[in-house]
Amino acid sequence: MAKKTSKGNATQSEISYAEYLYTEKNISPQAIADELERNIKTIYDWRDKYNWDETKDLFTTAPSELKKILLQAAMRVMKGEERKDAEGNPIKEVDADALSKIMKAYDYISKKANPAVCSDVLMELDFFISKKNPKLAAENTQYHRLFLMHKIEQENGN
């Protein structure tokens, strides 16, 4: 494949879209460069400048990891053990109450389907149905679009 050249200054929405593809969709920098018709170096520059790897880590940390930390802290408290770092120095224990509140908020947010997730699922569903019953898929597509518009309005507070 030919090397992509820069096509001028990027808009913030283009950079945000590239970040979304990298952090939430786990798309490779090369695939992003191809889609946006940008030089791969530009994508790597954006990744480094805007700390995309840190953001990606946030999306890949499962709630089960946080629950594991809570359970480990509970076991230490139950046994009367002190949490220590690699050098043996005491570390402040996890604030279970604060973490519990954060997890409750996270669970609430993650149970709501955002428009991007809905769109992905509905597109996959439309494709599946079109293989089985093209007429039904065409009929459903209009309702799927209406539903997505509804979800976008909800997210925007309308």
Image (spheres, grey):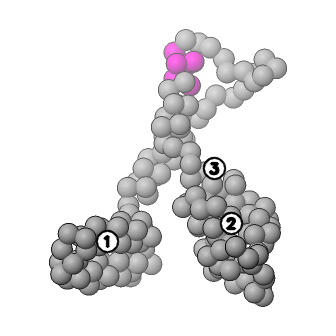
- Looking at the image, do the residues carrying marks 3 and 2 touch, with CB atoms under 8 Å apart? no
- Residue depicted at 54% across the width and 41% down the height: 98
User: Residue 145: image x %, image y %?
Assistant: 32, 82
User: Residue 149: image x %, image y %?
Assistant: 36, 82
Q: Residues within 10 Å of mark 1 (few under 14, many from 20)?
A: some
- Position of the C terminus by quadrant: bottom left
Q: Amino acid at mark 3?
A: Asp
Give the total of numbered labels.
Answer: 3
Horizontal arrangement in the rendering, residue 82 relative to residue 101 (left or right): right
Q: Amino acid at mark 1?
A: Phe
Question: Circle 2 sits on which residue?
Answer: 30
Q: Amino acid at mark 2?
A: Gln
User: Residue 13: image x %, image y %?
Assistant: 63, 80
User: Residue 21: image x %, image y %?
Assistant: 58, 66
Horizontal arrangement in the rendering, residue 84 relative to residue 117 (left or right): right
Find numbered disc 3 in the image and state the secondary structure of the residue it sits on. helix
Q: CA distance from mark 3 to mark 1?
A: 31 Å
Residue 116, visible in the rendered structure: yes
Horizontal arrangement in the rendering, residue 129 relative to residue 120 (left or right): left
Relative to residue 113, is residue 115 depicted above or below?
A: below
The magenta segment: 73-78
Foreground: 105 or 118? Answer: 118
Q: Quadrant of residue 9?
A: bottom right
- Residue depicted at 73% across the width and 83% down the height: 10
Question: Circle 1 sits on which residue?
Answer: 127
Relative to residue 18, is residue 97 depicted above or below?
A: above
Q: Residues within 10 Å of mark 3 (few under 14, many from 20)?
A: few
Residue at far top of view? 79
Find numbered disc 2 in the image and state the secondary structure of the residue it sits on. helix
Residue at far front of view? 1
